Structures are given as C-alpha cells and as structure tokens.
Image (cartoon, rainbow, N blue to C red):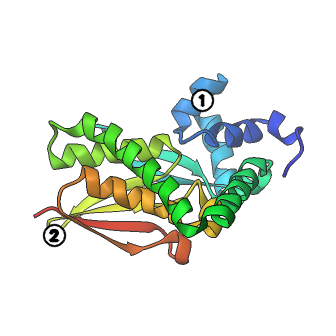
C-alpha cells in the first residue's frame, strides 16, 4: 500500500481512477483537466513499472484506441480490506455449508448477470452479442478484446480484477463461463487461464 501523498500526484490519481475500470488517455485527460500528452507520459511510466497495461479496443466503427487497466501488481498500492473481507466471508460460508454453498452463490450471480444481459441482446446477431458482452466486461475493469478466427470468436481477457479472490475461490471463474454459454450461441471452450498461470483468459466460441 502506498502513502496518501502518492495519490495526490497525477500518476497516483490516474492509478486511482483506473481502479474503477478502464480508461483512455483522452478520457483521463478530460477528467483531470490536463493534456492527453501529459497523461500519456504518466501512463508510459506506469506501464514501464508494470502497474498498468494498454490494449487496443475498437469502439464501434472507429479505429482502435488504447484502453488502460490496472495490473495485479497495482492492487498492492491500495488497501486490501475488500478482498480480505470477501475471502473471509466465503471461508465462513464454506465452513458452514461446504463447497455446494459457495457454488450456489456464484451460480446465482451468474444467472442474474446472464438474465440481465440476455434481455439486452435478445434481438441482436452474434457479432453484436459478443460486443455487448465485451462492453460489460470492460465496465467491470476487464481489459478484453475479441476476433473471429476460422469461424470461431476468440475472446481475450488480459487481466482479472478479482485475482486475489479467484486465488482462494476458483469457483468465481464459473460466472463468466455461465454468462457466455447463456448469452452466446454455440459451444464455448476455455483454452487458457490467468488463474493457472496463463498470459490471458482465452475463450473459443464456435457458433457454426
């Protein structure tokens, strides 16, 4: 955890802002009332120090833009009370109700999330559904992009905002699996996972 003084600096403010999700240099510049170039300089330093990562994301028909998210290392700069509390609560649930009780919680979260998303994509085609799913993940702080390869959509998650919880409660990963299966047609297969040491969480979704 870093001192309050650090978070009074521009670099610290950018780090704190990105903890709430993702952002581009232009969005951060507008938020802090400084130039995009000034923000980019700070982002370069933060990226060099391994605290943020930038990933190209296409918004609509515009050319790709770099969106930045925090890396797991950056979380060490913040108080860890929430992760610890959540893990403690899940430990108590596991102790009193066993693994089925923990799975039931994440199943309920997955069903509720999928239900909300399905209402948004009901009349949409597959490509639009994938974009809506990606947008939902980005709103939750996940750096995600996707492409179409040999008839399959490949979804790439480059970070995990819940890494400290997943490490102790891998059942949390079942949420995204269930949401994808409910919202997107076809067969889904996860071929790489951050939780098991992979460079990303990668899902192959064959719709044909």
Mark 2 neighbour density, 10 Å: few (under 14) some (14–19) many (20 or more): few
Mark 1 neighbour density, 10 Å: few (under 14) some (14–19) many (20 or more): some
Q: Position of residue 23 (x, y in %)?
A: 53, 39
Q: Position of residue 149 (x, y in %)?
A: 21, 67
Residue at image location 89% in from the left, 44% down from the top? 3
Q: Is residue 206 left or right of residue 8?
A: left
Q: Nearer the viewer, residue 135 or 180?
A: 180
User: Which residue corresponds to mark 1?
Assistant: 29
Q: What secondary structure is marked by label 1?
A: helix
Distance from the alpha carbon under mark 1 to that under mark 2: 39 Å
Q: Nearer the viewer, residue 8 or 157?
A: 157
Can see residue 39?
A: yes
User: Which residue corresponds to mark 2?
Assistant: 150
Q: What is the quadrant of the C terminus in the image?
A: bottom left
Q: Is residue 189 left or right of residue 91?
A: left
Q: Position of residue 97 (x, y in %)?
A: 61, 63
Rendered position, 183 above or below 170: above
Residue at image location 61% in from the left, 39% down from the top? 20
């Amino acid at each position: 955890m870093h001192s309050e003084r650090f978070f009074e600096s521009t670099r610290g403010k950018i780090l704190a802002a990105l903890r709430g999700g993702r952002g581009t240099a232009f969005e951060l510049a507008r938020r802090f009332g400084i130039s995009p170039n000034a923000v980019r300089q700070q982002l370069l330093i933060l990226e060099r120090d391994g605290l943020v990562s930038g990933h190209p994301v296409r918004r609509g028909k515009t050319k790709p833009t770099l969106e930045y998210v925090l890396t797991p290392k950056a979380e060490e700069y913040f108080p860890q009370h929430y992760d610890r509390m959540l893990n403690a609560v899940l430990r108590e649930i596991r102790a009193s109700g066993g693994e089925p009780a923990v799975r039931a919680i994440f199943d309920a979260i997955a069903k509720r999330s999928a239900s909300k998303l399905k209402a948004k994509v009901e009349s949409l085609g597959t490509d639009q559904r994938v974009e809506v799913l990606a947008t939902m993940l980005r709103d939750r702080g996940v750096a995600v992009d996707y492409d179409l390869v040999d008839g399959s959509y490949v979804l790439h998650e480059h970070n995990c905002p819940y890494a400290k919880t997943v490490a102790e409660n891998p059942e949390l990963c079942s949420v995204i699996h269930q949401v994808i299966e409910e919202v997107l047609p076809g067969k889904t297969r996860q071929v790489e996972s951050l939780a098991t040491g992979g460079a990303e969480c990668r899902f192959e979704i064959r719709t044909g």
